[in-house]
């Protein structure tokens, strides 16, 4: 979600100008979710592949399979709190603080995908002009939110099967193996997305290598915000960027007018 204008203060560090992108709350929220995701991944994979040598080592190191299950379920419960806290804060911000729903997916995000593909294949000479969040960040965000909801529902189904059938006796018994398959496969998909997509965009992408520090410092350089979020830069500064062709980072696609 987009912060209000009075919080979007820019700052000077050395010879570079930086813009505030995330506050302390969002930084801590991200690190807490990342830690929970890491614990869920390690303890979940150790249970799924329990016959493998590395999984046995993890299980034994953590004190046995019962302890691993307790850690996994406790962390899952914490993740539930994180997710509902995030949704509640976002809803409050939209309803009462008049936040801009900048993370919502629009038709432009799909046209941005096509525009960037044309740019990468050399068909056009300029990339898509993105706003506060580009389409990659939006798709990843909603993947986490929707996938997280699925993990919560299927996880609770596996954790409390007796209570589920007592509450909803009309459900077929096949719901348990179906929940197990959905929980396991969604977890593998989430891990695959994080490993390939999120880590690449945060570490190995030529635009941020060796590390995108924005989520740790809350700041983004003027060079990057012009390159990656030109529409947001124009809105914050009121400065209209002149669109010019560029082929790499050194040749910005937008320059100050």
Image (cartoon, rainbow, N blue to C red):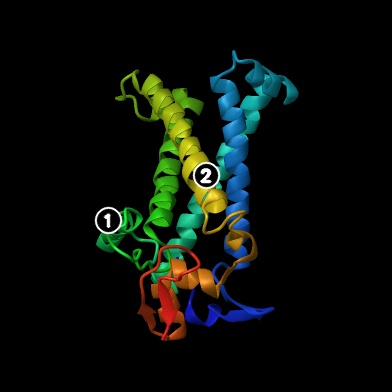
Quadrant for residue 162, please give it: top left
* Image position of 101 with respect to 39: above or below: below
Residue 193 location (% of width, % of height): 46, 40
Q: Which mark is residue 214?
A: none
Quadrant for residue 117, please give it: bottom left
Q: Give the foreground label among 2 and 1.
A: 1
Q: Quadrant of the C terminus?
A: bottom left
Residue at 38% across / 51% down in the picture?
139
- Viewer-side residue, 89 vs 121: 121
Which residue appears farthest toward the top when viewing the image? 51
In the picture of the structure, the residue carrying the numbered disc 2 is 80
Residue 157 location (% of width, % of height): 44, 29
Q: Is mark 2 in CB contact (under 8 Å) with mark 1?
A: no
* Image position of 6 with respect to 94: above or below: below
- Viewer-side residue, 25 vs 198: 198
Residue at 31% across / 20% down in the picture?
172
Q: Secondary structure at mark 1?
A: helix
Closer to the N terminus: mark 2 or mark 1?
Answer: 2
In the picture of the structure, the residue carrying the numbered disc 1 is 114
Residue at 29% across / 25% down in the picture?
170
Label 1: few (<14), some (14–19) or many (≥20) C-alpha neighbours in 10 Å: some
Please state if 116 lies on the left or on the right of 214 as rendered: left
Residue 2 in sight from this viewpoint: no
Q: Secondary structure at mark 2?
A: helix
Residue 48 location (% of width, % of height): 53, 21
Quadrant for residue 57, please give it: top right
Please state if 21 lies on the left or on the right of 91 as rendered: right
């Amino acid at each position: 979600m987009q912060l209000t204008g009075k919080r979007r203060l820019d700052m000077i560090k050395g010879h570079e100008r930086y813009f505030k992108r995330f506050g302390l709350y969002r930084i801590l929220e991200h690190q807490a979710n990342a830690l929970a995701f890491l614990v869920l991944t390690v303890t979940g994979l150790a249970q799924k592949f329990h016959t493998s040598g590395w999984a046995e080592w993890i299980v034994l190191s953590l004190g046995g399979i019962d302890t691993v299950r307790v850690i996994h379920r406790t962390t899952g419960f914490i993740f539930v709190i994180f997710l509902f806290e995030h949704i509640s804060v976002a809803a409050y911000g939209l309803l009462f603080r008049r936040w801009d729903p900048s993370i919502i997916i629009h038709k432009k995000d799909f046209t941005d995908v096509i525009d960037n593909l044309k740019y990468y294949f050399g068909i056009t000479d300029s990339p898509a002009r993105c706003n506060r969040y580009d389409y990659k960040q939006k798709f990843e965000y909603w993947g986490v939110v929707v996938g997280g909801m699925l993990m919560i529902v299927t996880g609770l189904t596996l954790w409390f099967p007796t209570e589920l059938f007592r509450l909803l006796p009309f459900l077929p018994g096949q719901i348990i193996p179906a929940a197990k398959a959905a929980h396991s496969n969604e977890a593998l998909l989430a891990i695959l997305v994080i490993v390939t997509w999120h880590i690449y965009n945060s570490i190995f992408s030529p635009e941020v290598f060796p590390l995108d520090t924005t989520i740790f410092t809350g700041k983004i350089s003027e060079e990057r915000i012009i390159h990656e979020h030109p529409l947001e830069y124009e809105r914050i500064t009121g400065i209209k960027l002149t669109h010019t062709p560029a082929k790499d980072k050194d040749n910005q696609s937008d320059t100050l007018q």
